[in-house]
Every structure is written in structure tokens, then in C-alpha cells.
Image (cartoon, helix red, strand yellow):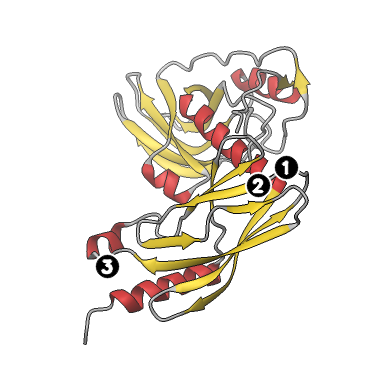
Amino acid sequence: MRRTAIALVTGAVAALLAACAGPAADPSSEASSSSAEPPAAVPAVPGIEAEIVRLRTDEAIGGQVQVRLTDTGDTPFTVTAVALRSPGFALEPPKTVTAEYAPGRVIDLPVPFGDPVCDTAPVPAVAELTVVRPDGSVEQLHVPAAADVLELIHAEECDVQAVAAVVDVAVTDLRDDGDALTGSLTLTRRKGTEPVSARRLSRSVLIDATAELPLELDGDEHSASATVSFTPATCDPHVLSETKKPYVFPLSVAVGKDDEVPVDLPLDQSARGLLAALVQRVCAPPS
């Protein structure tokens, strides 16, 4: 799948980032179509440095990153709200926090990112902060953030979005066969006539997943299905208690001649409940 990183950016985004040196940006504003000029650089804020990072817990939760802030000055401050501002992602409202910084202190603040804007590059990025100074004064700051990881996340999210525009992936009719759950893995065409192929299904930390693959959806077909089954892969107590991604199963999907894209199987709350009950039953100690 082609990586989406088009350098054209929207006039609205340019205005947003150019305004970051002054009043806080309006969280309700949205990116629109292209402009030939890149967004204006946001000036550094003395005493505060920002970097966007993604931790393993962020990958497990999905839809969030960390704003890693460092107090590089010689006075403390407190952050009471934080948001990520990137032209490549839809805006999310600021998140309320309470983080007290002292000189040299580094604290990661989790923030959500919105849906990808796939015709717009994700950098430059800005950490939007509400900061309380030691004298009680409150400032709205926009701190330029190192954000290499956003380019990777943006590419991943846009690849998944491109696949989802062509084909819907579903797991249905799950039934309990005693030591396994069995159901149907279905590809349903949304648009186009390119062939679609589901080629590999990976296990989660807890559970093996198998399917009759490759599952091929020809250009003139509306849907195609295969049997999928889930069986517990481990009953190790440490894994059972510590895993952050118990029911995430990447399915590699290719559209036409594009590269394969890992798409998480869409499992609703009912399916997750069945998987949890299966693990609990199989892994329960003998009475």
C-alpha cells in the first residue's frame, strides 16, 4: 500500500499552525483541501520541550500517543490541559490533566489523535498546553513537538483507511465448540473492482486464530467467506494478567497489486465476551 505523505497542506491548517504563536487554536476547526504553502513554523517556547512518542500501551489501546514534555528551564510549572495538533489528523479536544513539572523533569501525557487526514502530511506537530505558573497566572501555549513517530502512525492509519474504503471485514456467527470458538470471516466489497485477498491471520497474545486462507474476493464478487476459529494459546498466569492486547488479531489484506496491510479483526463486545469466557473456562484450574 502506498504511504500517504503528500506535502500539500490546507489553508485552514496553515492558519491554525501560524496562529499557534498567539491565542489557542479553535478545537472545532478542521482541515480542508490543499494549499501550496507549508504551515508556518511554530516558535520554540523557552523552558519547555515537547516530543510525540508511542509506547506499547498506546499501541494496545489504539488512537493515542504521548506528549513527552521536559521542563528545560529553571522554574516549575503545572500543565492542566494538553492536546495534539497535527495537520495530518482531525482535531481532538484538549484533555484535562494535572502534571507538575520541576526543572529537568520529564513527564509523558497521553493524548488521543483523531482520524487521519490522508491527503495531508502529519508534521509539523504542536503540543497545545494550558500551563499554570508559580504565581498562579495561566498561559495557553503551543510548543513545537518532534514527531517522527506521527509519520509512521499516519501511514499505518491511512493504509487501513484505504483498505476499509474498498472492503469490509467481519467476523460473524461465533459459536462455542467446547475448546474453541468457530465462526465466519467475511469480506464484503464496498466499492471498486480490484481483487482483494486476505492472506494471513496472526494470533493475539492469548489466543490462536486460524482461518481458511487465502480468502479471495474477485473483482466481480460482492462477498466471500471462510471459516475462522479461536483457541487459547496459553494459560500462563503472568500473560493472562499482564497482557494489554488480549483480543487483537491482525489480518493481512491486499487490494489489487498494493502491499499487504495489517487490519485488526473487528470484534464487537459480544465476541470479546465469548473469547474471555473461553479462556477462563479452558484455563481454569481443576477443582
Position of residue 279 relative to residue 85, above or below, is: below
Q: Residue at x 58, y 39 (%)?
A: 157
Amino acid under disc 3: Cys
- Residue 45 position within the rendered picture, expressed as x and y whole percent measured from the top left: 48, 17
Say above or below: 110 vs 148: below
Tell me where residue 31 appears, x and y as whole percent: 72, 30
Res 141 visible: no
Q: Is residue 125 left or right of residue 29?
A: left
Q: Nearer the viewer, mark 2 or mark 3?
A: 2
> Dot 3 corresponds to which residue?
235
Indicate the amino acid at tag 2: Val
- The label on residue 194 is 1
Q: Label 3, secondary structure: give it.
A: loop
Give whichever of 198, 142 is nearer the camera: 198
Picture coordinates of residue 102, whole percent (x, y): 31, 29
Q: Residues within 10 Å of mark 2 (few under 14, many from 20)?
A: many
Instruction: Give the Cα distance between marks 3 and 1.
Output: 42 Å
Could you tell which of marks 2 and 3 lies nearer the N-terminus?
2
* Observer-nearest of 59 and 130: 59
Q: Residue furthest bottom?
A: 287
At label 1, which amino acid type do we have? Answer: Glu
Q: Quadrant of residue 34?
A: top right
* Residue contact at pointers 2 and 3, CB within 8 angstroms: no
Quadrant in the picture for the C terminus: bottom left
Q: For the N terminus, give its image quadrant.
A: top right
Quick check: marks 2 and 1 in contact, CB under 8 Å? yes
Residue placed under numbered mark 2 in the picture: 196
